[in-house]
Amino acid sequence: MFELSFERTVTLDWLEAKFATEWTGVSYLAFVAVSSDNRIAAFYALYPVMMNLSGREVIAAQSGDTMTHPAHRKRGLFLQLAERTYQEAAKQGIVLVFGFPNENSVGGFRNHLNWRFLPDLVTTEFRCGGSWLTHCYQKLRHRSEERVFEHLETVKANDQTSAMSSEANSVVRDAGYLQYKHRIANGVVIEAEGLVVWLKPGRRIDVGAMNGEQDMTSEELAVRLRRIMKMCGAHTMRFTYSADSEPLRKILNIAQVQSRTVAGYLYLGGSEGEVASSDQVADLFFCRGDLDYF
């Protein structure tokens, strides 16, 4: 199903790790549609996380990996599975479902599942700068993943959660959350150049979250980011933040917008006023580390 829907090959170990959200109290939350010949026809999943909403810690869940086999599309299976999953989620105490639907599924969320939508997430890219020769040098000196992680271990942050945002209305990015994320994909939190950065290294570094940039000018931040890129043998860094957020405004001074991602949510647990006001929900903050595939 992953290959047919996303042109991705995944392993059973990876899937088990992605569903292992037991630190929230809820795990393996999904429904599957099976055809008469005993084949998977469609799949819908929620991945629970802890979320701080208006000063109250609740269980929320991210919607992800919506898939329907090509032979069974246009039959309403996605909507049926989503509704059943939401019913089960509410029984499990999940208050809020959020997600970042693609163009193929956003209509269903908007028109049939009554989702509300937030300002988009904005992805930006920061480049190492310099001449063409500098770029060539960066590519030639690119290290193997193993060597990069060995080097990053020397600057690994003692407080692994200090790169996480403490916004009032956001995912709780605590030690349990980080441990879960690092089971899905290689990631590390480093402390270097006055910054604490949660990242996945590569020629293009994906930054899950960052702390310490608030007191730096844009020029100072750019210098420090380039030093971290040099440390990893990378030529670009990619950031994703909610539109109109302070972290996005800061990074936009030195980075270029690459894409925008739709963000939405659905309340499951009681009336909206029991958890947060509509205005507060509209201020939900997400970063790249919150994406289910980070």
Image (cartoon, rainbow, N blue to C red):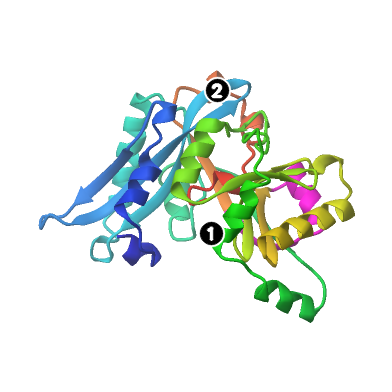
Badge 1 element: helix
**As drawn, is 131 to the left or to the right of 211?**
right
Residue interval drawn in magenta: 243-261
| Residue 248 position in % (x across, y down) | 74, 49
| Residue 134 position in % (x across, y down) | 78, 75
* Number of numbered discs: 2
**As drawn, is 284 to the left or to the right of 38?**
right
The quarter of the image holding the N terminus is bottom left
Determine the image quadrant of residue 63: top left
Disc on the earlier residue, 2 or 1: 2
Residue type, numbered disc 1: Glu
Q: Is residue 265 above or below residue 57?
A: below
Tag 2 near tag 1, CB within 8 Å: no
Question: Which label was assigned to residue 57?
Answer: 2
Q: Is residue 88 magenta?
A: no
Residue at numbered disc 1: 146
| Residue 294 position in % (x across, y down) | 52, 50
Residue type, numbered disc 2: Glu
